[in-house]
Amino acid sequence: MLYLQTNPSGTKYEHSKTLPIPDSIYNSSPERRQQKIPDIVFAYADVMLKKLRLSGEFVPLKDNESLQPDLMYDQIMHRVRESQLKLTVKKTPLKKEILLKLLVEPIKILFILCHGDIDDKTEASFFCLEDEEDPSMIDYFDEARLKNLLIGKQI
């Protein structure tokens, strides 16, 4: 499994640690490939606007706040090719409807790349996904809801 993090400037990703890959995810089975079930799904929300807490106004993200999903995806693909494992990878925008579908698919690794936010009043945390109608806008997905959806799944 590959662990990546942003550097302090937030402008690029660096490989920081390689963890052992569990035996269960080595190489796709022919059945998985025939059914076109990806082993790894790279789901990203590349929103371009954020909401200011005090005014509620939407403003563009600064360059150093961008997640750069293409860069991270390229690094993941490089590591997959380098490993010489037969793994299938699917790249998709991260929206609520897509996330809910992904959670029921028998994928081996779901890699979510998005910003997060915290409600100042309730201290609830949220994933900042792409809005269904305008991908440049944020659509919030409650972290507690994701946890509840994952309970009972084999992870």
Image (cartoon, rainbow, N blue to C red):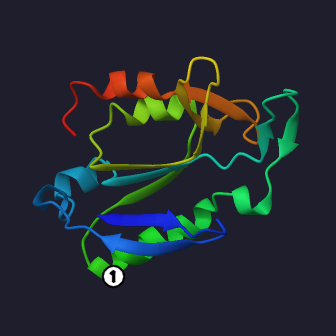
> Going 27% across and 49% down the picture, which residue do you hit?
108
- The residue pinned by badge 1 equals 82
Q: Quadrant of residue 85?
A: bottom left
Compared across the picture, whether 139 is left or right of 126 comes to right
Above or below — where is 10 with respect to 79? above
Which quadrant is the N terminus positioned in? bottom left
**Which quarter of the rendered picture does the C terminus lie within?**
top left
Give the residue drawn at x 25%, y 69%: 86
Q: Position of residue 114 (x, y in %)?
A: 57, 46
Q: Is residue 47 left or right of residue 16?
A: right
How many numbered discs, if any?
1
- Give how far across and how far down residue 90 sits, in percent: 44, 55
Name of the residue lying farthest toward the left = 23
How many residues crowd around disc 1 within 10 Å: few (fewer than 14), some, or many (20 or more)?
Answer: few
Residue situated furthest bottom in the rendering? 82
**Image x and y of residue 121, in percent:** 63, 18
Above or below, 79 against 47 in this view is below
Residue 138's x, y, as percent? 70, 35
Q: Amino acid at mark 1?
A: Glu
Taking the spot 43% from the left edge, 31% from the top edge, the residue there is 101
Instruction: Please name whichever residue, 47 or 86, is drawn nearer the observer in this view of the structure.
Output: 47
- Determine which quarter of the picture holds residue 59: top right
Q: Which one is nearer the viewer's eye here, 53 or 145?
A: 53
Residue at disc 1, secondary structure: helix
Above or below: residue 47 compared with residue 3: above
